[in-house]
Image (cartoon, rainbow, N blue to C red):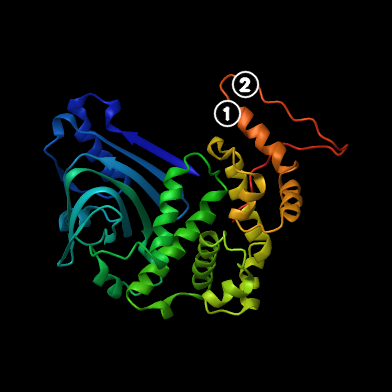
Amino acid sequence: MIETVFRCEDLPRADRFDFWREQMAQLMAPMEMSSDHTRDFRGEVRILDFGAASVWPTKFREMNFRRTPKLIRQSDPELYHFSFILEGNLQVSQSRQEAAHSAQGLYVVDTSRPFDCLAFGGPPGGVGLEIPKALIPVPHDRIDRLLARPIPARDGVGALLTGFLARLAADRGSYGPSDGPRLGTVLIDLAAALLAQAVEAEDALPPETHRHALALRVQNFIQRNLSDPRLSPATIAAAHHISVGYLHRLFRAHDTTVSAWIRQQRLDRVRRDLSDPGLLAVPIHELAARWGFTHPAVFSRAFRAAYGMPPSDYRHLALMSRAPGATPRRPVRTDSRPSAPPTAPVTS
């Protein structure tokens, strides 16, 4: 994955706003920009390249930016630009539609149409997502109804998309070059599913996009219900109105099984709890039970198979490594089998 970063604070104050304006014109699209903070402008943008899609974690001072017909004729990348707002306020207008957006808000604009955006009430910050319009299989005339308007972001596909964007923005340096196209496909499928749902055009989506979006909804459901020991393929399938057989096919496409994916997610949660000094007084079997492991012996075998050591040894090593100035040592083992260092969990 390629990451590009630019920040105004690295330049003399007198040059910052011009630099910001030039960079935004080159990296996004030409826009007219103005601000009451040009003498001490501050802004930072990270651009994460995920193949056809790009993610923009950004924060900047209050300002106004406009995309005019003249600038569109000058240059048009033909993109849909989604903005997920984490802080601040934006007033956005496009296609005779205008709306105010605040924290946890989500909207989309079309770079091929004029728009006006005013950031006010404190420095705005959030995560942008840019996708070529040609890759969204939803009729563009229907999407026109959504431009600049609030899109539901707290539940359903909207929550999946915004949660995914927030994780990509936060996990700095966690992805390699080979991850980009795969993650880009996920982003495009989620964005297309969200737009199709919002304009009631799900029939326009190709089957593969439906499957990808459904798989992500299923994984999100599982992660929210890991603590329930009754979680099973049957309950998951029923919650999503699909057959158990179809659920298994969704996971086989990712070279895993439903049960294996649930088990790995639960093990990952327990592993993180074992590394938390604040939970040192909590017995290991209670931590396991919190995440759906009802049988301590079954949990211990699964943990050892995944991480190469008993959970008690893992906790000891993890907490020793957090102690200031401590040099962690591997605990004395009571068997003769070779041990392995703890490894990162496998996730989809």
- Given residues 315 and 162, the one toward you in this image is 315
In the image, 186: left or right of 81?
right
Residue 93, given in percent of the width and then of the height, sits at 17, 60
Q: How many marks?
A: 2
* Residue furthest left in the image: 36
- Pick the residue in front: 138 or 194: 194
Q: Is residue 22 left or right of residue 344?
A: left
Decide: few, some or many residues near mark 2? Use Cα within 10 Å; few <14, some 14-19, many ≥20: few
User: Is residue 197 in view?
Assistant: yes
Residue at the right extreme of this rendering: 336
Left or right of 314: which side holds 43? left
Alpha carbon distance from label 2 to label 1: 8 Å
Q: Nearer the viewer, residue 34 or 311?
A: 311
Report the amino acid beneath label 1.
Arg
Mark yes or no: residue 136 visible.
no
For the C terminus, which image quadrant? bottom right
The x and y percentages for residue 29 are 27, 50
Instruction: Give the SS element for disc 2.
Output: loop
Residue 190 percent across, percent down from the top left:
44, 64
Q: State the mark number for residue 152.
A: none
Write down the residue under mark 2: 326
Residue located at (41% from left, 77% from top): 202
Of 184 and 321, which appears nearest the observer? 321
Report if the CB atoms under discs 2 and 1 are less than 8 Å apart. Answer: yes
Q: Quadrant of residue 78?
A: bottom left
Q: Is residue 215 above or below residue 69?
A: below
> Mark 1 highlights which residue?
322
Q: For the residue marked with disc 2, what is the amino acid?
A: Ala
